[in-house]
Amino acid sequence: MTSVSGPLLKVNNLQVDFGSGDTVTHAVNDISFQIRDGETVAIVGESGSGKSVTALSLTRLLPTPPAHYVGGEILFNGRNTLALSENDLRKVRGKQIAYIFQEPGTSLNPVFTIEYQIAEAVQLHRPEVTDVRAEVIRALDLVGIRNPAQRLGDYPYQLSGGMQQRVMIAMALACQPKLLVADEPTTALDVTIQKQIMDLLRDIKVKTGMSIMLITHNFGIIADIADRVVVMFRGKIVEDGPTGEVLRHPKHPYTRALIDCVPKLGAKQRRLRAIDHAEIEASA
Amino acid sequence: MKTYILRRLLLMIPMLLGVSLLVFVLVYISPGNYLDVLKAQRDIPAEFIAKKERELGLDRPWYMQYVSWLGRTVRGDFGESWSYRIPVIELLAQRAPATLALSLTSLVFAWAIAVPLGVFAAVYRNSIFDKLSALSAYAALSIPEFFLALLAVIFASQWGGFPTGGLSAIDHDYLSPVGQLWDYVHHLILPTIVLGIGGAAGLMRVMRTNMLDVIQSDYVMTARAKGVPGNVIMFRHVLRNAINPLVTSLGFAFSGLLSGAVLVENVMNYPGLGQLIFQAFMRKDRDVVMAAVIIGSSMLIIGNLIADILLAWVDPRIRYDK
Amino acid sequence: MTSDLLHQILRRRAGAFCLVALILFYVAAFFAPLLAPYATSDQDLTKTYHPPTGVVWHEGQLAVRLYKLVDPTCAKYEAEPGQFAPIHFWVKAPTYHFLGLIPVSHRLFGVEAPARLYLLGSDETGRDVFSRLLYGSRVSLTIGLIGILITTVIGLTVGGLAGYFGGVFDSVAMRGTELIMAIPGLYLIIALRAALAKYFDDSDQIFILIVVILSFIGWAGTARVIRGLTLSLRNRPFIYAAEALGQGPVTILWKHLFPNLFSYLIVTSMLSIPGYILGEAALSFLGIGIQEPSTSWGLMLSQVQDLKVFMLNFWWLLTPGLAIFITVILFNVLGDVVRDIVDPKLKTQV
Amino acid sequence: MPSTTTPLLQVENLKVHFPITAGLLQRRVGEVKAVDDVSFTIERGTTVGLVGESGSGKTTIGRALIRLVNPTGGTIRYNGKDITFLRESQFRPYRKKIQIIFQDPYNSLNPRLTIFKIISEALEIHFPAMGLEQRRARVAELLGKVGLKPEHMDRYPHEFSGGQRQRIGIARALAVEPEFIVCDEPVSALDVSVQAQIVNLLQDLQEELGLTYLFIAHDLAVVEHISDFVLVMNQGKIVEAATADAIYQNPQDPYTKRLLDAVPKI
Amino acid sequence: PRQKLKREFPPLPKDVDITTKPPGRYGGIYISVDPGGGPNTFNYLVAEDATSMGAISTVLEGLVRRNAMTEEIIPGLAKSWEIGPDNKTYTFHLREGVKWSDGAPFSADDVVFTYACIYDERFPNRHASDYSIDGKPFKVEKIDDLTVRFITPDIYAPFLEMVGGGSILPKHALQKFVDNGTLMKAWNIGTHPREIVSTGMFRIASFKPGERLVYEPNPHYWRADSAGQRLPYLDLSITKFVRDQNASLAAFATGQSDSENVSPADVEWVRRGEKAHNYTVHERGPSTVCNFLWFNQNPEKDKSGKPFVEPYKLKWFQDVRFRQAVSYGINREGIIKGVLFGRGTPLWGPETPANTKWFNPDLQKYPYSPEQARELLKQAGFRWNEAGELFDSAGNRVSFSLNTNQENPIRQHMATVFKENMKDLGIEVKLQLLDFGTFVKKIGESYDYECGMLGLTGGGDPVGGMSVYLSSGRMHEWYPNQKKPATAWEARIDELMMKQLKTLNLAERKKYWFEVQRIMSEQLPFIYLITPNSYEGVKDRWENVEIPKAGGITWNLDEYYLK
Ligand SMILES: Nc1ncnc2c1ncn2[C@@H]1O[C@H](COP(=O)(O)OP(=O)(O)OP(=O)(O)O)[C@@H](O)[C@H]1O
Ligand SMILES: Nc1ncnc2c1ncn2[C@@H]1O[C@H](COP(=O)(O)OP(=O)(O)OP(=O)(O)O)[C@@H](O)[C@H]1O
Ligand SMILES: [Mg+2]
Ligand SMILES: [Mg+2]
């Protein structure tokens, strides 16, 4: 069903505001980018630069109000999701575009077991699966949860932060989407698990041709998995290019500064480098 | 949890003792006693009243009366109704099924309309539907129950279709079993509506508010992102998080299952326990009152316990044993 | 904070309307002795069940129609053609001590006896329903507010602390509420009445007593529900965060739990207002409510639970019900507005 | 008075177990040994890094230290004093001294309070003498330190991005001016620049005021950077404890080795 | 699908009672409504309320009956009786061949058994004291199977009506309960209807507590019509029990029941449905409810030495001019016109006109007249200030509180009208509406009140009022339980009451009782108010409906048949 010609996802001049009148914030300000089939695009950027808002806008998940989709279009498989009906959108969500949210602590329903929450995704999108429980166990196992069978009955609050995050990942993957939007999926994970997850994503990508939109601050991961990098700064996209290119030859001063800030293991600095915003504004 | 339940059940004993003692004293100090009605009749001689007083033990100090009442009750004998002259248990058992049926149906009715209406009102916030349902809820709350009952009676008598009251039709005994069942149901409908509507109105508005509180949570967004259909989100993901106060109030409702609704029962001539117990209260038919209180309190305690268990079940973050 | 809230309410159309209307109601209640053409007890046995007098513009001034009783067996009145009694403003009337102090010997408007001004008809003994409504609003408009204030404060404190501390405290507090719920209110009331009998001459004291009794019975349920909600909020990280700051339990209850319970509290409080208005009438049945000839909406309404009101179409006797309904709507819509205002997620959207 | 030689925090054989329950009646079917016999000490003015597999019990240790979960066993000494089983009221004085930055920023912010209220609450408790204006100024200053703007003060938590929320949590902890902070992944949701800013801030404060940190994180580079001493946890136990250098240069435990190997390179 | 009701017709008893009415047809179901909420018991010794009594007297006949229309005593289970010359011996001749509904023969043994039960110390019951004089029981002897003799210790005026009309219990059914001492528990509402045997026109077919009582014809009933058809004609008689009059009224007005007591205020609209639903609302004239108020004239003190009534107030209350002034000041006509839609009657004495046999129309009356009231007050030394407020000669403001119970709306209106009427006289009345228990305690035990208002259902023989009119009486409300009469007129009433009790001569009794009524109306210890008129709606389809002035309309239900 994927169109051979166009990209899987094409965002054109998207603008999202919060509030109205004099208290308005332009969280996302006229951005355009695209993700092709099977491509992994990393989005990096300053905290609060609009990455999550962009991600959520893809299937119009932000509550309106307070959010307003002021302009632009989001073409997924050629269809503008901003114009779809809620019902049609529902068919896109999960099945076509699945999410891993940034804050698993609030994104999991506190009153349902993790089994239920993952199973729901499986049942919704993969009716062919007969043994849902086994599928859930498999999903949990894949994301590196020990003794998954025993963890099925746990409620979110009983899990550690990293485990919650992995449950989110398992849930998103259980949907087997076309496009996975992963909003800082590994922040709470230790590096071994992080690696395991990245390997897993790569595997799935290879197997199913899934595209990934990966929001992260971790340049190591970007280097590891991303095909392309999009850099956001204050609601705008300031740089967009192939990973190697961007990492090695960043064009925008912000990108450059950002890469400079990455702390390196074993590097003996007394202070970590931070960005001097005035400097960037001056040079941009 | 098991120990928690056990502890709660054990606590029932001092609770019931306390309640019974308190109510006993209240009955005692509230002016008048069972013989008031006799005293107010002009052709009853004073000696007969004195004799009755001795017979019923009303001439003894209250603590003596309480001790003997307690002694009997502990042995499982709830005593005898003074005005009916039959064991209290028999008397209550006679009326209990009707009351239970009415309470249950009205409870189910109230919940069955309150929850969906509340949910839809929250989902379609500020829509015409929301406003209409709010208006009807306020109206239902502003109309006293007895008025609603009266309206139902007028409705039934003017338009037919429903009986004007009672538990069964006159020819009930001559109906087929299915006919008899339908007859009971037919007589239940109006009282159920009358009783249920007031409760439903409050529940519905509370439901709506709580839904509004929960509807914006991140996990609702998660569910939406998963592609869960709207109704499932509302009725499963949100409802479960919003239902807490309703569950607590279910505990109270449980305790009311057997006490009935005096006003509605009176107006609609529904022969239930509410009527009986109220009459016993007014007549100061002490053992009936005490039995009703003991049963009511037990139901309340158990209802609350069930509500607490359910509360922990719908919201796993709630823990009692620290 | 409060002025901010007020400002916010007034910015919304529904909020402003309800607030202004309620204020008008309260002002009318306060000035009832001036506004009401008659005292609550003023009877006219020749004009029982009088229909509302039509007010017309007659010969350059407002006037009321005069009516003739055509069928005493069913209180049927007919307007007498061409007969009017002019409405006078600021008329002299029996002296009334406003707030028990200031003597007032005028009413805002009235007609000359023996004609009578029945804006909303008259009742079984020919008393003016409109005047009684006005006077009755003094009780009915205050009782709910004071009642919910008391129940909410006690319920919030007991329920909140029980849910917050859990364990033994919870157990003790909840057994306490069970005790209160288990005692039949009827007996409690009768016993309290007996115990407090000596105060029963003074209507103010009765009124306070009614409120206290109703709240005393009412707080237990609130406390239990609050406890249930608190139990659920109690294990949220933000409560941990407050604890970690060293915040005391009462402050946590007040500053952290209360705002999260506010939606529920405001809505249920407003919903419980009719309960108080009507509950007070039930008490008067036991001789401890507002007593005749004083009045309240609940009492007026409970006195007309009678088929003839419907069959003979004495609809004006049901106006107290309408008054209750309107008040309930006003309070609840206002409550909804306030709820929306304090909900931070809705706050950003006007 | 504890001598200057006693470590600020001594943890001995700390155990935290959670029951596993099942069914409506919540039968207890087992337990999770979240922290299982853990001992370590933290010297005054130092930073101890705590790394380990996700779910290994790091957060639980942090929470046990400030008594948000009750330890199942063991002792915790603060400044030489046993605080393991103090009653809440007795523990209250320690609340000013020990603070925590929560791993889960949004859940730990009261959704109904503005950022100003959330942060100024700490000031109200511990600096009751401050007036409203002073508090506003102080909150603005704290927000500035964590890279937020003063005008964010009157917003509610849900109006912030994930990283911004995390910074609010940090500002709140700092507001109390504590001696000891449990930092539970304080920088994991931040972009590297803000992360650097925060880490630098923490280090500056440590130098200025002699603060002590228990720093839980996954980013080994950051841990290495900030810590004097590192604890490695796996499945509720501490599997390795050494100075930062020693660990990174010469890891002993197989898990530590794996951990270091897994670090992605740019 | 109603099954055809089958009736059996065993042979008529030898001494069958033949009705004077022309014969009718079998069939029909009669549905009536009882606002009492249903019987509490079917046990004659236990029953205390009117509903239970009514049900019991339907199934258990007495030796004599009363024709409600003529108020004559007519034969019941006894076909005739003689009174001995000492006026203390009554010999009853029972009908021959009468059977209980279960077929067991009825005999003098049942009568003797009944009185043995009543006088049995183990079974305290109210009849025992009714059927005694100064604590001495009657002697009841069986002469033969069909003859019993009663001997009273003293002359007892209402013997025939009170004792003769008393229910006779079935020995064969109840003996076992007497033997094991559980008689008081027998025949309760849980008892199977078949065990409750009957000598009346009906036996109980089924009973649903709180709901309805279904009667079916007693196959052994001892009355028949001239065509030899055993009465009653009805197939069934069903009494529905209600707590709330509204529902049953609505049901009647829409044609769903056969009879209904209609209150004055409802008459008009109920009548509007007469054509459509084929019923008629009959006016029965004044009801038997007697409403009155009184001042507490009890001069005694409570345990702490505090007088029950403030002495200065007691002075007013004891002044007959004050009481008369109050009576003149009450606008009875106004209440009737306004509140009762004109359907009521003012009262001037203890009996309402409904009690045709005992009502004395010739009493002192107090038509509404504020002028007369003021005159009397002036004579009694009261004065008004310029604001029109009344003061006594000692300068005390005349003010008192009126206590009454809440249940009855009409009484409540009377209270408010009274308050307003008194205000016109400058008297301040405070209303205190109490619950029943508190009120009874106040007027019967603690006496701490000033003025009370009460409504009593009166009627019947004056002997029922002994406790009210005797100064030593328990219900002598204005000053009960007096050691000796406080005033001359109370002494005179005591005397008259005793006299009427001790003679069987009706004319003489009437004379005494009329004088009591006159004294009451002059001295006004009770200030009588009004009685609402009574109305009964009945379906037109019934023949032989005879509505008496007082009492139930279905007294001759056995003669009802479908037109
Ligand atoms: N509900 C809201 N109301 C107002 N402003 C909001 C709201 N949600 C987000 N914002 C603002 O929108 C901007 C973009 O937020 P977004 O969550 O997309 O950031 P982000 O790039 O994901 O940052 P982070 O890396 O910290 O998660 C932020 O400045 C935030 O303050
Ligand atoms: N309240 C609780 N009830 C039951 N089990 C819990 C609870 N809290 C934590 N656990 C369990 O304790 C273990 C340790 O959790 P903890 O949160 O300390 O891990 P962590 O080391 O902080 O992990 P992460 O790096 O993922 O945050 C986990 O297995 C978790 O499931
Ligand atoms: Mg984000
Ligand atoms: Mg953690």
Image (tube, grey):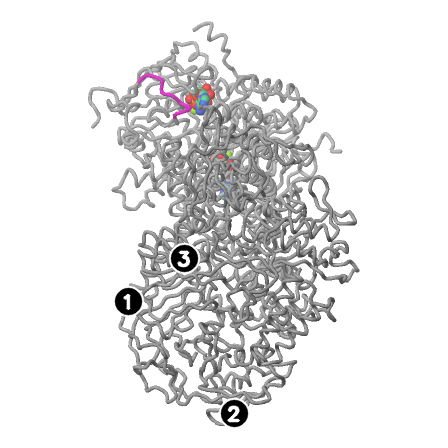
Q: Which of D68 and D205 is in front in this view?
A: D68
Q: Is residue C207 magenta?
A: no
Mark 3 Cα-neighbour bin, 10 Å: few <14, some 14–19, many ≥20: many
**Mark 1 C-beta to ligand 2 under 8 Å:** no
Residue E147 shown left or right of residue A224 in the figure = right
Residue position marked by numbered label 3 in the rendering: E249
Name the chain letter of the residue that bears numbered label 1.
B
Letter of the chain that mark 2 sits on in the rendering: E
Do dots 2 and 3 share one subunit?
yes
Q: Is residue A71 highlighted in magenta?
A: yes
Q: x, y percentage for residue E371?
A: 64, 48
Residue bearing the label numbered 1: B176
Pick the front one: C336 or A37: C336
Above or below, comparing residue D221 to residue E82 in the picture: above
Q: Counting other residues with Cα less than 10 Å from the Cα at mark 1, is it few (<14), some (14-19), or many (20 or more)? A: few
The amino acid on which the numbered mark 2 sits, given as a three-letter code, is: Lys
Q: Is residue B17 visible?
A: no
Q: Left or right: E238 with respect to C49?
A: left
Could you say where residue A220 lies in the image, as x and y percent from the top left?
41, 22
Q: Residue furthest bottom?
A: E144
Q: CA gap, disc 3 to disc 1? A: 30 Å
Q: In this view, does E474 lie above or below A101?
A: below
Q: Name the residue under label 2.
A: E142
From the image, give the main secondary structure of the stretch colored magenta.
Answer: strand
- Classify the position of the N terminus of chain A by image quarter: top left
Quadrant for residue D93, please give it: top right
Secondary element type, mark 1: loop
The chain carrying label 3 is E
Relative image position of residue A254 (x, y in whole percent): 44, 12
**Element class at badge 3:** helix
Extent of the magenta region: A64-72
Q: Which amino acid does label 3 sit on?
A: Leu
